[in-house]
């Protein structure tokens, strides 16, 4: 099967990557169901890439309905070692303006209705999420964004909310008081599942609004977000095309060995069905 080094997950407004060659659309099934859509395989700047729109083409899938386990597992099965995600978000800071970008380095998880782990069913693993984004990819994205002329913010805390409704004003003020920088609906459980799959994960966050903490300003609406996303997405594409040529062939960060000390269940306690189900994730540690 085609092997892709880099996975790209498109958010609102990003449903395809122009410039890909040797393109092939494939439909995959996984032990965790089907991904959001067919995965587009091809080469971008001569590098094997797998692209997936997380909401499906035509934006058909709610944030809480995204089959994140299937999406990340499918990338793993294709050989993906690094994921760059594109996410829209609202800002809690005056100086993080709509139309700008932010490369987050922390997350506060406020989702509650999503399955956030591959494990369970008799197999237990506890990965470290102290630093949820790959620091190596973050540095590359930041540098590429600056060279592309983007107004980009280095680091920040992303609140991952359940949605699909936007925040109440009280919620927005609460999250702002916590010191969070931006809010969105899609980074978790993606980042957590990528860590469990030992895939590096980073995000280009496209700021579209000020959420609803500003007392004298109209609340955020979907049409406001879509308006800013069009410009942000074009810049994100430019950054992606530049960044993929700078990603290391073999990651040396801690992301790529996250399960080495995380598996708690003794291999002798796993039956053949469990070993088969989790082989792609933990096979190298339990053989």
Image (cartoon, rainbow, N blue to C red):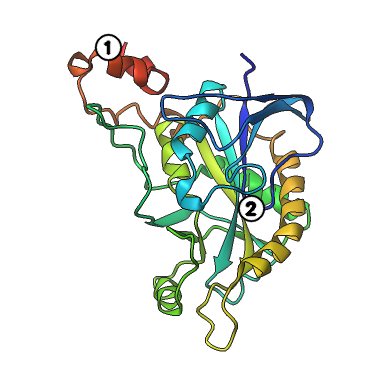
Q: Is residue 240 above or below residue 248?
A: below
Q: Depth check: 230 or 35 in front?
A: 35
Which residue is at the far left?
Answer: 269
Q: Is residue 204 above or below residue 32?
A: below
- Position of residue 272 in the picture relative to residue 131 (left or right): left
Q: Residue 3, located in which quarter of the rendered image?
A: top right
Quadrant containing the N terminus is top right
Q: CA distance from mark 2 to mark 1?
A: 40 Å
At 25% across and 27% down in the image, what residue appears? 123
Q: Which residue is mark 2?
A: 12
Decide which of 46, 58 is in the foreground and name it. Answer: 58
Q: Quadrant of residue 7?
A: top right
In the image, farthest residue toward the bottom: 216
Between residues 111 and 266, which one lies in front from this camera angle?
Answer: 111
Q: Earlier in the sequence, mark 2 or mark 1?
A: 2
Q: Secondary structure at mark 1?
A: helix
The residue that disc 1 covers is 272
The answer to whether residue 51 shows anywhere in this view is: yes
Which residue: 67% across, 69% down? 224
């Amino acid at each position: 099967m085609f092997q892709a080094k880099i996975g790209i997950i498109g958010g609102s407004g990003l449903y395809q990557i122009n410039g890909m060659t040797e393109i092939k659309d494939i439909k995959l099934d996984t032990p965790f169901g089907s991904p959001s859509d067919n995965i587009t395989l091809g080469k971008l700047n001569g590098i094997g890439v797998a692209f997936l729109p997380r909401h499906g083409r035509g934006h058909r899938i709610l944030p809480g309905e995204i089959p994140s386990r299937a999406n990340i597992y499918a990338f793993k099965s294709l050989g993906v070692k690094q994921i760059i995600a594109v996410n829209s978000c609202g800002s809690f800071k005056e100086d993080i303006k709509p139309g700008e970008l932010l490369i987050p380095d922390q997350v506060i998880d406020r989702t509650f209705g999503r399955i956030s782990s591959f494990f369970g069913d008799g197999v237990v693993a506890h990965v470290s999420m102290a630093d949820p984004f790959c620091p190596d990819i973050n540095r590359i994205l930041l540098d590429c964004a600056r060279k592309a002329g983007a107004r980009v913010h280095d680091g920040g805390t992303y609140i991952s909310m359940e949605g699909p409704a936007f925040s109440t004003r009280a919620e927005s003020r609460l999250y702002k008081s916590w010191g969070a920088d931006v809010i969105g609906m899609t980074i978790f459980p993606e980042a957590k599942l990528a860590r469990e799959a030992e895939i590096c994960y980073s995000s280009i966050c496209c700021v579209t609004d000020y959420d609803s903490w500003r007392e004298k300003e109209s609340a955020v609406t979907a049409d406001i977000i879509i308006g800013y996303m069009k410009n942000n997405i074009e810049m994100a594409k430019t950054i992606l095309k530049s960044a993929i040529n700078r990603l290391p062939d073999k990651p040396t960060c801690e992301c790529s060995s996250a399960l080495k000390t995380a598996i708690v269940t003794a291999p002798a306690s796993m039956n053949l069905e469990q070993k088969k189900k989790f082989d792609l994730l933990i096979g190298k540690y339990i053989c």
